[in-house]
Image: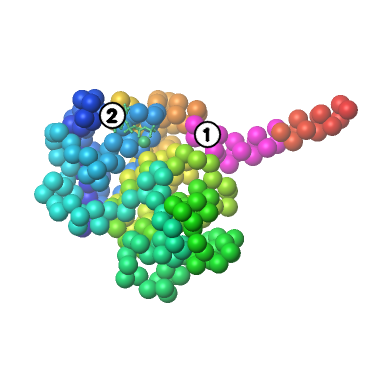
């Protein structure tokens, strides 16, 4: 599988009859990474669910390498998709076992190499027994960020043709975020990627940003092009993403310090 994805006039309705995608068309090149952005309810997850065939669509076609996904055997098709859902799924067991889940034949050495490929494996030093630490029931002993990282390492072990990330909105500590970004960059180099992005760094790492509104594409391009357009993306950026940029965080910190100094001075 090369991972070329084409939506052709896709019509998608949930069982309550709500039409979310109405003649949706989009062509994604093999190896390309796409970030979908848009307000809540815009249809981002629905597009990902249609590709993964978690739901069937009512009209049009989704083609992978030119073949209709409905002609594929569901199980073998899914095994070629690397999916990280909004709530990553971990089972009780060790981190090593959770990473291996995607490819049971992976050797210990391979898993160790992949675990050490992000941040020189520093993230493992914060865990009591490194790769052999127990993650707890559904991963409860790990932070949300660590659970995401484990899910991404799983995808690195799997090496899928297509990668689908429905990014969690939960805030992540800066250290884990850096490791997540490194893992993500490694995956993006290899797989055609559909990123439902909530973090600015994820949006910016995509080759192309698709802006969705009411199930339709209203803008697309890279960050600079879309900002120059002063449209929906620029508005989304100013309301959500800008607050995460380094400049913004840096300025906010300086402002807080100045306030602090002024308060101290006035006492
Ligand atoms: N299982 C479902 N049954 C019925 N309607 C649904 C279902 N899931 C989503 N919808 C509806 O479909 C539309 C698109 O939802 P979708 O989950 O794709 O949005 P989203 O862009 O992923 O939003 P968010 O940013 O909140 O995750 C919304 O109007 C939503 O209410
Ligand atoms: Mg969603």
Q: Which quadrant would residue 103 be assigned to in this image?
A: bottom left
Which one is in front in this view, the residue at disc 1 or the one at disc 2?
2
Respond yes or no on whether mark 1 lies under 8 Å from ligand 1.
no
State the image coordinates of residue 90 (x, y, percent, origin top left). 41, 54
Respond yes or no on whether mark 2 lies under 8 Å from ligand 1.
yes
Q: Which quadrant, please, contains the N terminus? A: bottom left
Q: Is residue 37 left or right of residue 25?
A: right
Q: Magenta span has 231? A: no
Figure colour scheme:
rainbow
| Nearest to N terminus: mark 1 or mark 2 | 2
Q: Secondary structure at mark 2?
A: loop
Which residue does the image show at 33% across and 58% down from the upper left? 190
Which residue does the image show at 13% across and 36% down from the upper left? 60
| Label total for image | 2
Q: Which residue is mark 1?
A: 242
Answer above or below: position of 245 versus 90: above
**In terms of secondary structure, what is the magenta stretch mainly?**
helix
Q: Nearer the viewer, residue 259 or 172?
A: 172
Q: Secondary structure at mark 1?
A: helix
Q: Magenta span has 251? A: yes
State the image coordinates of residue 10 (x, y, percent, origin top left). 18, 34
Q: Contact (CB < 8 A) between labels 1 and 2?
A: no
Magenta residues, start to end: 240-255
Dividing the image into four equal quarters, which quarter contains ligand 2?
top left
Q: Which residue is mark 2?
A: 215
């Amino acid at each position: 599988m090369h991972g070329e994805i084409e939506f052709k006039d896709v019509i998608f309705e949930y069982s309550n009859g709500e039409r979310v995608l109405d003649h949706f068309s989009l062509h994604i090149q093999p190896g390309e990474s796409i970030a979908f952005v848009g307000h809540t309810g815009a249809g981002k997850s629905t597009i990902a669910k249609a590709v993964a065939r978690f739901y069937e669509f009512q009209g049009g076609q989704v083609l992978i390498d030119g073949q209709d996904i409905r002609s594929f055997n569901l199980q073998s098709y899914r095994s070629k998709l690397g999916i990280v859902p909004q709530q990553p799924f971990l089972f009780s067991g060790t981190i090593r076992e959770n990473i291996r889940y995607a490819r049971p034949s992976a050797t210990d050495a391979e898993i160790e190499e992949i675990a050490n490929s992000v941040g020189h494996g520093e993230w493992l030093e914060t865990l009591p027994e490194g790769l052999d630490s127990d993650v707890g029931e559904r991963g409860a002993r790990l932070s949300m960020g660590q659970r995401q990282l484990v899910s991404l390492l799983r995808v690195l072990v799997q090496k899928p043709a297509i990668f689908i990330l429905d990014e969690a909105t939960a805030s992540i500590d800066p250290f884990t975020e850096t490791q997540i970004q490194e893992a993500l960059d490694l995956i993006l180099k290899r797989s055609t990627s559909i990123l439902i992005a909530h973090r600015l760094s994820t949006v910016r790492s995509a080759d192309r940003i698709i802006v969705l509104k009411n199930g339709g594409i209203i803008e697309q391009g890279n960050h600079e092009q879309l900002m120059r357009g002063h449209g929906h993306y620029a508005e989304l950026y100013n309301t959500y993403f800008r607050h995460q940029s380094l400049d913004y965080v840096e300025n906010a910190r300086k402002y807080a310090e100045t306030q602090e100094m002024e308060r101290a001075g006035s006492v």
